[in-house]
Amino acid sequence: MGNGAPSSGVRVPRADAERVRASLDAAGCLDRAWRPVVDGGHLVWPVHGGVSLPADVDGERIDVAPETWSAAPPPIDPHHRLREAVERWLLTHIQADRERQEALLNDVPKRWERLNDLVLLPNDAFASPLWKEALSASERPPWAEIAAALRAERLGQQAHIASDVIRSSNATMLLGASGDVEVTDHGVVFRFDATQQMYSSGNVTERHRMGNLDLRGETVVDAFSGIGYYTLPMLVRGGAEHVHACDINPDAAAWLLKGAQANGVEHRLTQHVGDNRTTLPALQGVADRVVLGLLPTSEHAWEDAVRCLKPGGGWLHVHMNVEEERIEAWAEETAARLGGSIGHLERVKWYAPRIRHVVLDVHVSRGI
């Protein structure tokens, strides 16, 4: 380990370690290629040879055998940056042997969702018994370090989607007071509160597909509009003449309006807030197409959706969770039940083992 390794380091008490590291880094003294050395209740930060230490660094500069150091992971990859940041936090805040520290580091999340300057960690991140014990033992959790490593201003944690009618997000903020987000995807601006509304990055291909449709001159009913997953792409990119957006959640509807205003398409949007067993019958005969984007099934709204189509018929976009081996059969059965023909079958993503989120485009030649 001797090649290129520093010959000296700055030895400081753990309590001062992060402050000293920041000073050394800002002054260009810190050798980032190497990990700090644990020395009892102290850490030894690697420093470049021949440099003068900043005046505010009151640690002891000591000679260190080159073979003592171990290489730090490359800082470019965000996964490496995250691991490095968490490792520094552990070294400066948690009294633990190397084996326990490695176990904690190996449990650092490998995935997360970025929503502009907000990063949402998965619901199982830092939730193991070992991590719960480590977090309870420290007065300050590592959220600021994690956010900095991931180049984020705010940090949150996802939760299991609520089983209520409006499918609330239930995400929590770990760093930062507000979950309000503005995201631009394929030229479409979405606005929402990440702690209250869902925003699924996994649906990106379907959002793009709906936006790629030529909807000029068409009136569309979005039966489960939410914050505008499909409403906004159809208005902004598809050029729909008008969209009737139905949703039972008034908060999601309010964010959809903000998104429509941000995109300058609010004059082509009419919102219907309430149970669509009431709102859809009021839209009978107005639509060229109806989007049925509710999972695991929108089946309860199918008959009302057909009634929304104009007398000459139109398109239904039916979302469903279907067992992989039954997708083709389900598509045939559904098209027959709706009195139409299959135009397209889209496999969007895996929803669970052997279960796919699919979208079936059904053309119905005559409305009811």
Image (spheres, rainbow, N blue to C red):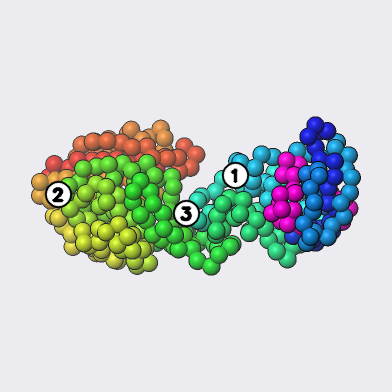
The reply, left or right, for residue 60 in relation to residue 257 is right
* Mark 3 secondary-structure assignment: loop
Specify the label residue 236 is tagged with: none
Residue at 71% from the left image edge and 53% from the top image edge = 27
Classify 316 as above or below 54: above
Q: Residue furthest left?
A: 311
Q: Are marks 3 and 2 in contact (CB under 8 Å)?
A: no
The residue under label 3 is 116
Classify 304 as above or below 186: below
Specify the label residue 217 is tagged with: 2
For marks 3 and 1, give the CA distance.
16 Å
Specify the label residue 78 is tagged with: 1
Which range of residues does the magenta coloring cover?
Answer: 20-41
**N-terminal-most mark, 3 or 2:** 3
Depth check, mark 1 against mark 2: the one in front is 1
For marks 3 and 2, give the CA distance.
33 Å
* Mark 1 secondary-structure assignment: helix
Q: Is residue 341 visible?
A: yes
Horizontal and vertical percent position of residue 209: 31, 41
Q: Which residue type does callout 1 highlight?
A: Pro
Is residue 34 within the magenta segment?
A: yes
Classify 231 as above or below 339: below
Quadrant position of the N terminus in the picture: top right
